[in-house]
Amino acid sequence: MPGSLDPTVVISLGLGLVTALVLTLVAVTVGGPGSRRYKRRLRSVIARKQGIVITQAQTTRSLSRRESATPTMDRIARRWLPRREVLARRLERTGRRISIGQYFLVTLGVAAVVAVLTAVFGHVRFLGALLIGIAAGIALPHIIVGRMGKKRVARFLQLFPEAIDLMVRALRSGLPISEAIINAAHEVGDPVGTEFRAVEAGMRLGRDLDSLLWDIAKRIDAPEYKFFVIALAVQRETGGNLAETLANLADVLRRRRTMRQKARAMASEARATASILGSLPGLVTTVLMMTSPRYIMALFEDPRGNVLCALAVTMLVTGISIMVKLARFDI
């Protein structure tokens, strides 16, 4: 029995798997919420022409139902994925309408593509390529979603002091805090405006302000925003000048932002050193594989070379991790 599959068979299996995933995505997109909305509107138009009355309960139930582009994958993911609530919060933190089913489909697609590429171009056995594909399918979407969430939180904190200033002006003009938040929601850009407009929509439905603000704290996991919510809660219980409290909070947030930027500028040399030292081994290995493959392949084919490669990678990752940790300041 051969040690590895024929490359033609692997390519055929990979293309078939990728084609199946593409067809699945097309099917769930065509048959998703857009199609259901179109059918619902068509039924309502036909009902009006025929004189059939659509009750308010049916309309409310239709509007309150949260539809997804991938309902089947959502059900599968809810059944088999662990810690679904944590994943749902991470997806909400990005500010995009990414369902758990869509995330699951992307994970499967990345795993399949990486496994096929590893088996074909890396000449890795099927089991090893499958393990590499699974690892890449789990790691890459997780990293990308995390970076999207961090960028959105950073944009929120960039605009948050200006939003607090608008609230302070509204409070000093005599408006209540709820109207001040609504005013800031329509004046400040995204993502601050988007989050505060959600507060406005929730208050129209009868929810209290505190619960709506703490719902935003689940998506904007930043101490600056939690300071704001706690300040509102303390002022509501103890009283005091809320406008002055929020003005002081905005000044503190601006000073924190300035200090963080100064610390980042001071640590730029260490970050540049870590990036250069971390990229040099990969660049040198790539150049040697292109210019002198017979010279460098002995390092990967000999067992002693594999041990040296593992030791070098371990030392490199350890050194880069230490330099990154030294260059990172929590303010």
Image: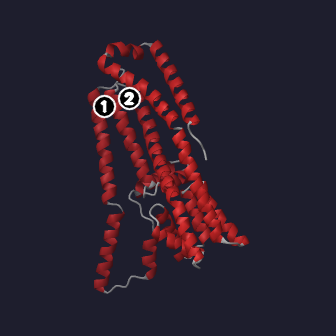
The answer to whether 146 is drawn above or below residue 174 in the figure is above
How much space separates mark 1 and mark 2, taking CA atoms?
Answer: 8 Å
Q: Amino acid at mark 1?
A: Val
Quadrant containing the N terminus in the rendered view: top left
Outermost residue, right side: 238
Residue 232 in the image: x percent, y percent?
A: 64, 67
The answer to whether 105 is drawn above or below residue 197 in the figure is above
Q: Which mark is residue 10?
A: 1
Mark 2 is surrounded, within 10 Å at the Cα level, by few (under 14), some (14 to 19) or many (20 or more) other residues, namely: some
Residue drawn at 47 percent across, 19 percent down = 309
Residue 242 in the image: x percent, y percent?
A: 65, 71
Q: Amino acid at mark 2?
A: Phe
User: Foreground residue, 143 or 175?
Assistant: 175
Residue drawn at 61 percent across, 55 percent down = 223
User: Foreground residue, 155 or 147?
Assistant: 155
Left or right of residue 38, residue 79 in this image = right
Residue drawn at 43 percent across, 50 percent down = 103
Outermost residue, bottom side: 51
Residue 229 in the image: x percent, y percent?
A: 62, 64
Residue 295 in the image: x percent, y percent?
A: 35, 13
* Element type at mark 1: helix
Q: Which mark is residue 126?
A: 2
* Element type at mark 2: helix
Mark 1 is surrounded, within 10 Å at the Cα level, by few (under 14), some (14 to 19) or many (20 or more) other residues, namely: some
Label whose residue precedes the other's in the sequence (1 or 2): 1
User: Foreground residue, 3 or 103?
Assistant: 103
Residue drawn at 50 percent across, 56 percent down = 158
Labels 1 and 2 touching (C-beta < 8 A): yes
The answer to whether 218 is drawn above or below residue 208 in the figure is above
